[in-house]
Image: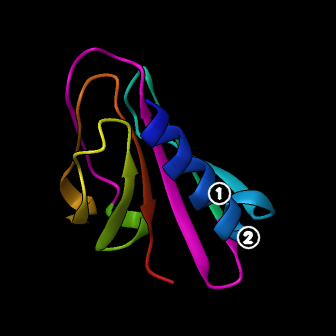
Amino acid sequence: MLSFFRALTALRQSSPALTLGDYASVDVGVENIFAYTRTHGNERYLVVLNFAGTTHRLDLSRLGAEAEILLSTGMESTGKVRLRALYVVGNEGLVLRLPG
């Protein structure tokens, strides 16, 4: 947990979008999943929080074709993912970098 907190703090401090950026909620059409974007200049991030205990497949392709997972609560999910089929496991939070 300490590693996650440190990584999240470092990411937030290094990104104007995550500290000063414009906020916009994203309707994912699934109860217990909260998502939003933060944008500042060319920086765009997507935050997805799954408050359910089950895995969900989301279609967020309206935000772009793919994104890069920068941080996940389990510290296991990394790399590029297709937004048409974004899997969010139970009780997972993701911070993704969207194409600029």
* Residue contact between numbered discs 1 and 2, judged by CB atoms under 8 Å: no
Please state the horizontal and vertical placement of residue 10, each as a whole percent of the image: 60, 58
Q: Is the residue marked by circle 2 packed among few (<14), some (14-19), or many (20+) residues within 10 Å?
A: some
Amino acid at circle 1: Arg
Q: Is residue 15 left or right of residue 63?
A: right
Instruction: Depth check: give the residue in front, 64 or 17.
Output: 17
Please state the horizontal and vertical placement of residue 24, each as a whole percent of the image: 67, 53
Instruction: Depth check: give the residue in front, 74 or 68.
Output: 74
Amino acid at circle 2: Pro
The N terminus sits in image quarter: top left
Residue at position x 50%, y 51% in the image: 7
Asked where in the image residue 76 lies, by quadrant, the reply is top left
Q: Is residue 71 above or below residue 45?
A: above
Which residue range is magenta in the image? 39-60
Q: Is residue 32 above or below residue 2?
A: above
What is the distance, in whole Å, between disc 1 and disc 2 at their CAs?
A: 8 Å
Looking at the rendered structure, the secondary structure element under dot 1 is helix
Q: Is the residue marked by circle 1 packed among few (<14), some (14-19), or many (20+) residues within 10 Å?
A: some
Q: Is residue 69 left or right of residue 82?
A: right
Residue at position x 60%, y 77% in the image: 43
Asked where in the image residue 23 lies, by quadrant, the reply is bottom right
Which numbered tag is attached to residue 12? 1
Asked where in the image residue 79 lies, by quadrant, the reply is bottom left
Looking at the rendered structure, the secondary structure element under dot 2 is helix
For the image, the number of numbered tags is 2
Q: Is residue 29 above or below residue 62?
A: above
Residue at position x 45%, y 71% in the image: 98
Instruction: Depth check: give the residue in front, 41 or 7.
Output: 7
Residue furthest to the top in view is: 53
Please state the horizontal and vertical placement of residue 6, each as a whole percent of the image: 54, 46
Residue at image mark 2: 16
